Image: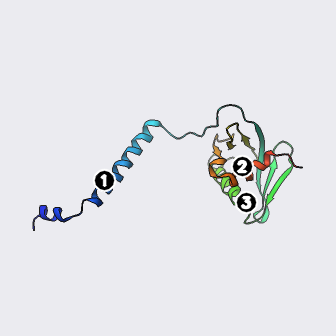
Amino acid sequence: MTLGDRLKRLPILPFAIMAGIILFGAHTAVEGMRRGPIRDILPAGQPLQQRALIFEDASKGIVAVRDADTGEELETFGRGEGMFLRSAMRSFAANRRDIHVGPEEPFDLAAWPGGELTLRDPVTGRVMTLTAFGARNAETFRNYLQPKS
C-alpha cells in the first residue's frame, strides 16, 4: 500500500479541526501582539462612591478589612470565610510582593455610573473590575461603600 493510498483512508475531519485550532491560535497571537499588552483601566468619568481600604492578615487565618482613613474595622473573615475577597487580595498581594510593598498601603474601592465596581491598587496601578466576577462576589466589596446603620 502506497502513502497516497494510506492518506486516502484517513478521515479528513480531525485534520480540518486541528488546522482550524492552529490557525485560530496563530491569529489570536498575532492580534494580541498587534494590539499591545493588556492594560488595567478604570471606567470613564468620576466614581459615584469611593473608599480607601486596608486588608490585614491577622493571626489564625483571620482577614480584617479596615477603612484606611479612620482605621475603623469594617469586617473580619475567619478561616474559610470570604473566599472571593481572599482570592482577590492574594492576587494583589502577589503583585506587591514582586516590588517589595506590603499591605500597609490602601486600595481604592469605587462604584461607577455604569454600575461597575472596581478595586485599584495605587501602588501597582492594577485594577480589578469586581462586577466581572458576578453580582454576589461584587456585593462583598460593595457593602464597604454603604454607611453602617
- The numbered mark, 2 or 1, whose residue comes first in the sequence reads 1
In this view, the mark in front (2 or 1)? 1
Left or right: residue 124 compared with residue 1 = right
Report crowding for label 2: few under 14, some 14 to 19, many 20 or more residues within 10 A (C-alpha): few
Residue at the far left in the pictured view: 1
User: Upstream in the sequence, badge 2 or badge 3?
Assistant: 3
Q: Position of residue 120 (x, y in %)?
A: 68, 42
Which element is circle 2 on? loop
Does the rendering let one see residue 94? Answer: no
Task: Choose mark 1 or mark 3, whichever is in front.
Answer: 1
Is 60 left, or right, of 10 in this rendering?
right
From the top left corner, tell me how far across and down residue 56 is, in percent.
77, 54
Which residue, given by chain and number where applicable, does mark 3 sit on? 82
Question: What SS does tag 3 mark?
Answer: loop
Q: Residues within 10 Å of mark 3 (few under 14, many from 20)?
A: some
Q: Amino acid at mark 2?
A: Gly
Name the residue carrying label 1: 19
Marks 1/3: CA distance?
44 Å
Q: Are marks 2 and 1 in contact (CB under 8 Å)?
A: no
Residue extending farthest top: 45
**How far apart are labels 2 and 1 at the CA level?**
47 Å
Horizontal and vertical percent position of residue 18: 32, 56
Residue, disc 2: 102
Identity of the residue drawn at 48% across and 37% down: 36
* Quarter of the view holding residue 118: top right
Question: Residue at left 15%, top 65%?
Answer: 6
Residue flagged by tag 1: what amino acid is it?
Ala
